[in-house]
Image: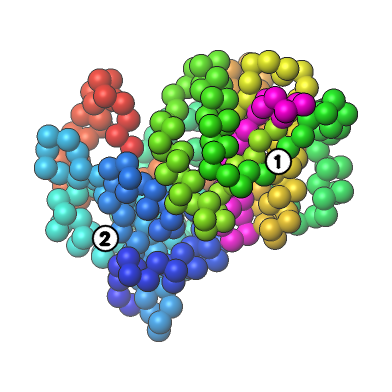
Amino acid sequence: MEMQIFDKHPSFFNHYVANHTYGDLLQTTYWGQLKSMTGWEPFPLGVVESGQICAGALVLKRIIPLTGKCIFYSPRGPLFSSIQALECLAAGVTDLARSHGALFWKMDPAIPTENRTWDQFAQKHLHKLEIGLDFDGVQPRFIMELDLRPDLETIFANMKSKARYNIRYAKRKGITVRLSHSKDDLQIFYPLLQETAARDRFSIRSFAYFEHLWDCLVPHRTAQLFLASHHGEPLAGAIAFRLGKRAWYVYGASANIKRNLQASYALQWEMIRWAKSLGCTVYDLRGVSGNLDPEHPLYGLYRFKEGFGAKLVEYAGEFDLPFSPLYRFWKPALNIYKRFRGNIL
């Protein structure tokens, strides 16, 4: 086994990610290209044996301001087929880290809890972070998965009655959903996203970021913009990702007006139909809180996603592989940096 950098052969690396059980778009070179426009340097790394990749990770490098040091991060990685391949990958990343001055390698694989191979590796090498039940980690630890293997009629029948009613109601009231094939439609989507962010009090990326996202992902058919309207008036929008047999609901937005028309339900149903038509077997509605107390402020988000028949899945969590004694200063320094400048990740 040996580790290689697949910057010159990205299709081989992306094929491995797309066909892996836990493969994620965030581990592809497409995502690496997008992140390279926001201050990260991507390294698509793979462990090769007999001409085949048996472990891999998109490692993103980010310089820590004013230090000369950097961090490594693998969103939804690494991927592996055996403990031996994973050990080889970790050894190769460690060597790379020494040459780049990395303090640690952060990772949050899309692996459900109690994966024996991962647990064995993590207990031996990694520092597990306590990120709580909400959204304190970089990627959500708790996600909602919808099984797309049944036919559409069965998927619809398995939804909660409220979801089925709202989907039908939106159609009766004239809500239409279209798949966008023009980058100009970001000019419609982004104001809806701004409106949503102001209403729900969360921060969003710049318009330029979404332009880059379109350029890096849409031509490869790994992202799709959806827009829902009422008599030509935009009411909701969403961006979905797709890779291999999996699709993800990633960015959602809705207007403050005509919320009673349930455009968001129509939008979700169209994205489910789209994912199913492409041969996906899982539709990932992404994060929810792991606290399922009905009194919890985020419980409504869980109820909305559960309404479509999605089931809660808990991932293994967030881990660091430290490379330097300076690692112990990372979290206090990051908290100070975020207070004044925002999240480095």
Q: Tell me the number on the disc at residue 64.
A: none
Position of the C terminus by quadrant: top left
Q: Which amino acid does label 2 sit on?
A: Val
Report the residue at 20% width, 55% height from top.
97
Report the residue at 12% width, 38% height from top.
67
Q: In this view, does 335 lie to the left or right of 31?
A: left
Q: What residue type is labelled 1?
A: Arg
Can you give x and y, in whole percent of width and height, for residue 286 in the image? Answer: 58, 40
Q: Main secondary structure of the magenta part?
A: strand
Label 2: state its secondary structure.
helix
Nearest to the observer: residue 232 or residue 239: 232
Q: Is residue 39 visible?
A: yes
Q: Give the range drawn in magenta.
A: 229-247
- Looking at the picture, does residue 318 appear above or below residue 167? below
Q: Tell me the number on the disc at residue 93.
A: 2
First in sequence: mark 2 vs mark 1: 2
Can you give x and y, in whole percent of width and height, for residue 341 in the image? Answer: 26, 24
- Looking at the picture, does residue 162 appear above or below residue 238? above
Q: Distance between the residues labelled 2 and 1?
A: 43 Å
Examine the image and state in which quarter residue 137 appears.
Answer: top left
Position of the N terminus by quadrant: bottom left
In this figure, which residue is indicated by the disc labeled 1? 178
- Looking at the picture, does residue 148 appear above or below residue 95? above
